[in-house]
Amino acid sequence: MMAMKIAEKQRINVTFPADLLAELNRLVPPRQRNRFIVEATEQALRRTRLGQVLAELRREPAWKDKDHPDLLTAPDVNRYVRRFRRAWMPHSWDEILAEAKGGR
């Protein structure tokens, strides 16, 4: 059995709007509220980080046409994809069957 690392925990004081707290109390059992709030916070932080990354990519895109002059037209992209697929896809039924059986 793998030992699980226990994260350090800290207590905080958070003020909720009364109606939101009432709904939390109504929907989430008392001994599950801490976990519920922590998981909701984790999800909100992931969304916030993703939003920051997307905003950064809007300012400075990862893909720039000038860096890929060989992929500016649809035929260029099709040629690239065909070459890429040929490099990793099985070429015959024997190869497909061998791959399905775990060979290759």
Image: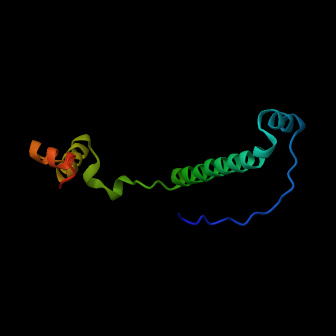
Specify whether 82 is left or right of 50. Answer: left
* In-front residue for pair 77/89: 89
Residue 11 position in % (x across, y down): 82, 60
Horizontal arrangement in the rendering, residue 65 relative to residue 70 (left or right): right
Q: Quadrant of the C terminus?
A: bottom left
Q: Position of residue 71 (x, y in %)?
A: 27, 50
In the rendered view, tell whether residue 37 sits above or below residue 24. Answer: below
Where 72 sits versus 29, above or below? Answer: below
Q: Residue at x 22, y 43 (%)?
A: 78
Residue drawn at x 81%, y 42% is 30
Q: Position of residue 41 (x, y in %)?
A: 70, 49
- Furthest-right residue in this view: 18
Q: Identify the residue at image location x=87%, y=40%.
A: 17
Q: Nearer the viewer, residue 92 or 74?
A: 92
Residues 56 and 24: in front is 24
- Residue 23 appears at what percent x and percent y? 82, 33
Residue at 16% in and 44% down: 96
How many callouts does the rendering have? Answer: 0
> In front: 73, or 15?
15
The way the protein has been coloured in the rendering is: rainbow
Extreme-front residue of the structure: 1
